[in-house]
Amino acid sequence: MKKVYTCFTTDYVHAGHLNIINEAKKYGEVIVGVLSDEAMVKYNRFPSISFEERMELIRGIEGVSRVIVQEEVMYDKIIEEIHPDYVVHGDNWLEGPMRAIRDNVESLLSAYGGKVIDVPYTYNDEVRRIDLRIKEKMSMPEYRRKRLKQLIDLRHLVKAIEVHSGLTGLIAEKTVVEHDGEIDQFDAMWISSLCDSTAKGKPDIEVVDMTSRLKTIDEVMEVTTKPIIFDGDTGGKTEHFVYTVRTLERMGVSAVIVEDKIGLKKNSLFGTEVEQTQDTIEHFCHKISEAKKVQLTDEFMIIARIESLILEQGMEDALERAAAYVKAGADGIMIHSRKKDPAEILEFCDKFRECDKKTPIVVVPTSFNTITESELAEHGVNIVIYANQLTRSAFPAMENTAKEILKYHRAKEVDDKLMPIKNIISLIEEL
Ligand code: SPV
Ligand code: MG
């Protein structure tokens, strides 16, 4: 009997999957691979049920003879292992980033005469409804909140991008690329104080009040499922910060990053060019421990941000603070620098990791942007935040469009730089 292989990334079986199995059966014995959580997160979305439950779900489909694990998005290992005569997949992989997976399968199979079978993808109301329900479930606080911790365990490095609106949220949620045979997407979203303030035309000095910041979170949450890391600035007074933590946790935010500055906060990238005051270790530890006391789940994370390198207080100070903040209950450490050279960040990470193997490290490589994600991960970094690049790319594009319209007294000259009207309309899905 011929071997037919198909891989599922689903947590719900609908008519489309049954159709694939029925087609596959026509060619021989059907083996179904279930994509591991790690691979699924990279390629598709976070599963809404456990890996074991997903295996069980597929075992229950009539006509499936064997269910196995597929550890990687690309099929090299699995094809080597089972040597199928056919690989069956929905024809949705003929387009977009998934095309690279199909190409990979086709070239592996052609080496020994195997064949790809593309089955017409099932688009109907039931499939759409199920997709929508899963997305809605994933956006609920009880599913979203814990996701950051889960991702830290699953992913070699968690990648977050800045968002400050529904639209930027959609970019973080939906952008998937294929590059050099790898499929990738962002894992999480960063609600930056700089970009949230900039979007409102205000300076990054905690002048945009918490009600407004929470409204931004709500807008983003409405249209996304990925976990949120909130830039909590200094957290304000400890007595106020505890309320912020309670609210963020209830909303389903996964983490707040709170920085060890006090008084009028200015953006860190100004460094010592402006007056900024670092909090005392004792006072900041008290802020962390009071906030940890009000937290109701163990899913929410309070990440302490150290400004010693920004304020030129030296490596020893940064390391001393890191140890103290972890002792006070911080669930992670963010270390920041405004140097172009990543050396001081890497030195911090290496030294911190000598004594603390577990506490997650977060970095924001805005200035030290030559460093790659894998280099950061090698030095023990767990979360990388691209903190402002969406805003910085949108602003010049919009400004240029405004200038061109003023120059030519019409919009024709800029039209070829703009997203077609049809695309902007279809960017937003309707319920
Ligand atoms: C932000 O994005 O608001 C940050 C990171 O806090 S930084 O601007 O580098 O201080
Ligand atoms: Mg900020």
Image (spheres, rainbow, N blue to C red):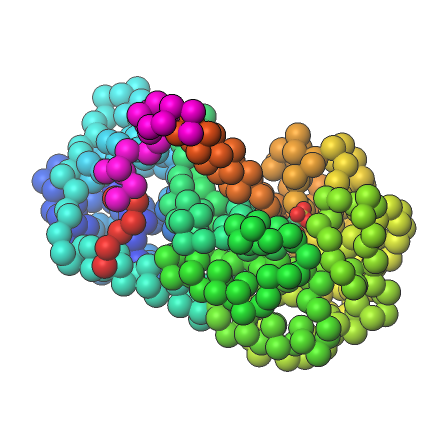
Q: Is residue 52 left or right of residue 201?
A: left
Residue at the farthest left position: 26
Residue 257 visible from this viewpoint? yes
Q: Quadrant of the C terminus?
A: bottom left
Q: Which residues are magenta?
A: 406-425
x then y, percent, for residue 100: 34, 29
Residue at the farthest front position: 409
x then y, percent, for residue 74: 39, 34
Q: Nearer the viewer, residue 198 or 43?
A: 198
Residue occupying the point 83% across, 52% down? 275
Q: Nearer the viewer, residue 266 or 343?
A: 266
Is residue 420 covered in magenta? yes
Is residue 419 covered in magenta? yes
* Helix, strand or loop: magenta stretch: helix
Q: Quadrant of the N terminus?
A: top left
Residue occupying the point 71% across, 50% down? 267
Residue 93 falls in image quadrant = top left
Residue occupying the point 15% across, 38% down? 119
Q: Is residue 429 left or right of residue 42?
A: left
x then y, percent, for residue 135: 33, 59
